[in-house]
Amino acid sequence: MPSASIKTIRQLIYYQYAKIISDASGLGKKNYAMIIATEQKLVSGEIKWSSAVHEWLKEHENPNVCIYCGAKENLTTEHILPRCCGGEDIPENVVRVCKHCNSKKGKKRMYEYFGYKNKDDINYIAVSKYLKYLYTLHERNGTLDCLVTDMCPNCDMQALCEKECHSEKLTVYCMEGCFKRKIKE
């Protein structure tokens, strides 16, 4: 769980991004003092996250490798936030993955697929793109400053949160659970 000071979706997205910054600096993803300080600087606007061009360049350093497992064959384009959950067919929402990972992930959102325990083990390029994309979607929906108590009633991941014992707690699932799978009629 993030620090008790993290209460909104905006703060949570920046908190997760601050972990990437801390890890890239060589301090790891568990240097909470740096993570909180970085999150606060991101929220205040003192520092900015990298542009989407950064991830694009990093992706193109290894264009023929699955971003999830490292496989080098049978690559496809995968929507990080599935289209059935409202994910758009735009560069900010896609990564290259092998057919196996794409099929296995299916219609799950990224954190839903990898699971709470593995949330910090996902390729940083995919996470960085995803966080920025979720930020844009939450900004568009007016939910960036929502509290977890505001999000839970509109989340379709409640069963997963109950199963994993974090109901009514702010987790990475809160960032993506309001983007519900659409049921075909």
Image (tube, rainbow, N blue to C red):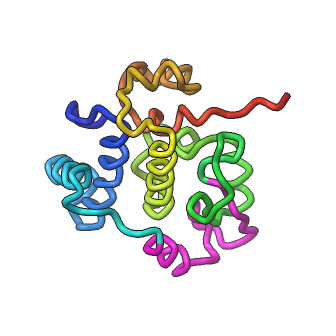
Q: Specify whether 123 is left or right of 183.
A: left
Relative height, residue 76 to residue 158 (above, below): below
Residue 116 lies in quadrant: top left
Image quarter in which the N terminus is found: top left
Image quarter in which the C terminus is found: top right
> Which sits in the foreground, 155 or 27?
155
Which residue corresponds to the image point at 65% horizontal and 63% vertical from the top-left?
97
Q: Position of residue 32 (x, y in %)?
A: 19, 47
Which residue corresponds to the image point at 71% horizontal and 41% vertical from the top-left?
84
Q: Position of residue 153 (x, y in %)?
A: 50, 18
Q: Specify whether 152 is left or right of 79.
A: left
Give the residues in magenta: 53-79
Residue 51 lies in quadrant: bottom left
* 151 falls in the magenta region: no
* 56 falls in the magenta region: yes
Residue 147 lies in quadrant: top left
Which residue corresponds to the image point at 44% horizontal and 52% vertical from the top-left?
131
Which residue corresponds to the image point at 20% horizontal and 34% vertical from the top-left?
5
